[in-house]
Amino acid sequence: MHSTVLLVDDEKDILELLTYNLVKEGYKVLTAHNGKEALRMVHQHPDLVVLDVMMPEMDGWEVCKAIRRDPAHATLPVIFLTARDGEIDEVVGLELGADDYITKPVKVRTFIARVKRALRNHKQAMGAPPAGVLRIGDMEIHTDNYVVKIGEKELSLPKKEFEVLLFLVRHPDRVISRETLLNEIWGQDVYVIDRTVDVHIRKIREKLGRHASHIDTVKGVGYRFKKDL
């Protein structure tokens, strides 16, 4: 899922420039032209706010304070964007809880890099799984070392059971036929029967316990991994 960035600036040219480049990088973009509008837009749950300091009606300092006071958005990452480049301004911004501080004129490549860094740092701080780990609720699938954990408990899955589970998880809510699973996991040159898949699914379900209901049987066709129960 692409991250959503809320851009707040009273300069139309800046909004258009940054929106164009963020969209080109695959981000969704919301825009606001003043502080009051920004606080309304925050309720659309952006993943990051890029906030100009000097704006009419309500400046960026005030907007940041309001965001930090709201428990629903207190951890929302904020980057200040401003023509004011004095050291004291930067200190004030960071002390208000901003994650970064970028001065104008904006260098687009630097701006994009700082946006990526702020989003990455926020995800890590919020406990997002590292690369190579898929998480469904309290179940973790470590793709690098064939480990499946539920909470603190590590499950013992042989290689083929792990690969069947991983294939289903990587194609959530899609019905996967037994034939597809046989070809993808065992290969087309190996002779195994459809019943082999059913046996592996049964064993996987036994080990998943309360998570077994994620794997749905589609009668006469195959199996589907339901991400949301």
Image (cartoon, rainbow, N blue to C red):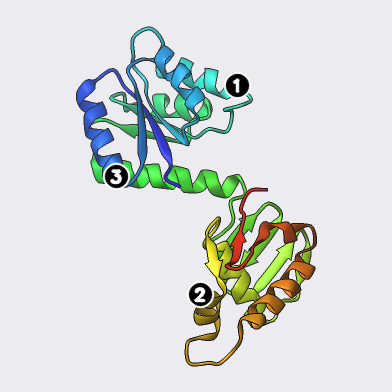
Q: Which residue is mark 2?
A: 180
Task: Choose the circle earlier in sequence order: 1 or 3.
Answer: 1
In the image, which disc is placed on residue 70?
1
Query: Left or right: 148 with respect to 17?
Result: right
Query: Left or right: 222 with respect to 198?
Result: left
Mark 1 or mark 3, which is nearer to you?
A: 1
Mark 1 or mark 2, which is nearer to you?
A: 2
Query: Left or right: 128 with respect to 11?
Result: right
**For this rendering, which residue is in front, 78 or 132?**
132
The amino acid marked with disc number 2 is Thr
> Gap in Å between the C-alphas at discs 1 and 3?
30 Å
Graded by Cα atoms within 10 Å as few (under 14), some (14 to 19) or many (20 or more), the crowding at tag 2 reads few
Query: Left or right: 5 with respect to 106?
Result: right
**Residue drawn at the location 41% of the way across and 29% of the way down:** 90
**For this rendering, which residue is in front, 15 or 212?**
212
Rendered location of residue 103, percent (x, y): 30, 31
